[in-house]
Image: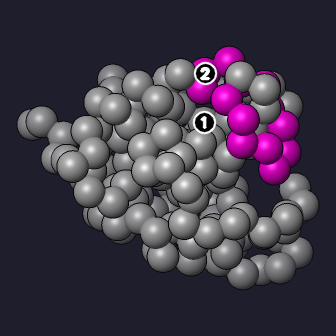
Amino acid sequence: MISRHAILDEARAWIGTPYQHQASAKGAGCDCLGLVRGVWRALYGREPETAPAYTPDWAERQGAETLLAAARRHLRECPLASAAPGEVLLFRMDARSPVKHAAILDEDDHIIHAYWGRAVVRSRFAPWWRARCAAAFSFPDADAWPS
């Protein structure tokens, strides 16, 4: 079993990592997918597949649910309404767009994510983010969050 606390400890260790498109190196640079990839490597070792090259506007240009499909291949989908700390959240930037942003749900109504142009941050899971949240996933073999 993977501890939810281990997931959160690792995600929090990335806070302050500068934003860098397509990167996944703790302390050096990452984007939102790179954060999730880095947490995966810390928990499981090797990544389950190589992420393809992608541009900042890949979701809009392709119109395909590439990120959502990858999450469904490697993570366990769970009900969005009961998402618990340590789960991966996926977001649509508008209702007509494919999923293109990822975060890890933290305790106390916060998310950890790579903020475009800045760094990995811990921010409030505010109504703006909640309205755009499209799916929630658990890492494989993650334990249950205590009630």
The span picked out in magenta is 14-26
The x and y percentages for residue 7 are 38, 37
Rendered residue at 50%/62% (across/down):
134
Q: What count of labels does the image hold? A: 2
Judge from the rendering whether residue 6 lies leftward or rightward of residue 113; answer left or right: left
Whether residue 37 appears in this view of the structure is yes
Q: Which residue is mark 2?
A: 15
Give, as a three-letter code, the residue at label 1: His
Q: Earlier in the sequence, mark 2 or mark 1?
A: 2
Indicate which disc residue 101 carries: none
In-image side of 82 versus 106 (left or right): left
The x, y position of residue 21, in whole percent, is 84, 45
Whether residue 124 is visible to the viewer of this picture, yes or no, is no
Kindly indicate the quadrant of the structure image that contains residue 49.
Answer: bottom right
**Residue depicted at 50% across the width and 31% down the height:** 11
| Residue displayed at 78% across by 69% down | 52
Outermost left residue = 147
Q: Quadrant of the C terminus?
A: top left
The question of residue 3 being in magenta is answered with no
Give the percent coordinates (x, y) of residue 144.
16, 47
> Which residue is found at the position 38% from the left and 48% from the top?
87
Residue matched to label 1: 113
